Image (cartoon, grey):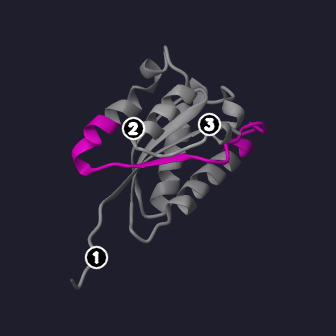
Amino acid sequence: MAQTYTRLLLHAVFSTKNRAPLITDDWRDDLHAYIGGVVKHRNGDLLAAGSVEDHIHLLIRFPATTVVADLLRDIKTNSSAWRREKGDLGFGWQSGYGGFTATTSIIPDVVDYIHRQREHHRGRSFEDEFIELLRKHEIEYEEQYLWD
């Protein structure tokens, strides 16, 4: 085959440092837009973003030349710096992340899940949700190393 054809989709999840409730309504949309700009700068598309006070979900389409760890490092580093420039000196993200592949056929379901984060977390913690995602995607983990 003379050309390379890909459609790579990532459902990324990560929390604020120590899962502190730092993401507030007055700047949540700006955060999502800023992250969209970071993704675009890396030649990707932010298809959906949803967050509550202590964590964020992103659905990202990215090119095959992009390394997932580098993309998420850039998102987290740049958005943290952006918040500090705005005077929020205590803002930061946890060191790790969850990254789950998605197929085109489930994009509507993933987008709906991401957009319904507030509703979803009325009776469930981030920790419980994250462990469920790990189990659903058959990712082995040791709970003692999940949280920083």
Find out whether residue 60 is within the magenta segment: no
Q: Amino acid at mark 2?
A: Lys
Tell me where residue 137 sits by quadrant. top left
Residue 47 is marked as: none
Question: Marks 3 and 1, how far apart in space?
Answer: 39 Å
* Place of residue 92 in the rendered image (x, y in percent of width and height, measured from the top left): 70, 41
Mark 1 Cα-neighbour bin, 10 Å: few <14, some 14–19, many ≥20: few
Q: Is 38 rendered above or below residue 30? A: below
Mark 1 lies on residue: 4
Q: Which residues are magenta?
A: 82-110
Residue type beneath disc 1: Thr
Q: How many marks?
A: 3
**Residue 61 position in % (x across, y down):** 37, 55
The answer to whether 88 is drawn above or below residue 39 in the figure is above
Sequence-wise, the earlier of marks 3 and 1 is 1
Residue occupied by mark 3: 143
Secondary structure of the residue carrying tag 3 is helix
Q: Quadrant of residue 28?
A: top right
Marks 1/2: CA–CA distance: 30 Å
Q: Quick check: 18 left or right of 117?
A: right
Q: Which mark is residue 136?
A: 2
Q: Give the amino acid at mark 3.
A: Glu
The mark closer to the camera, 1 or 2, is 2
Q: Residue at x 63, y 40 (%)?
A: 146
**Is 78 left or right of 116, judged from the image as shown?**
right
Q: Earlier in the sequence, mark 3 or mark 2?
A: 2
* Residue 37 percent coordinates (x, y): 50, 53
Q: Sequence-wise, which precedes: disc 1 or disc 2?
A: 1
Q: Nearer the viewer, residue 109 or 39?
A: 109
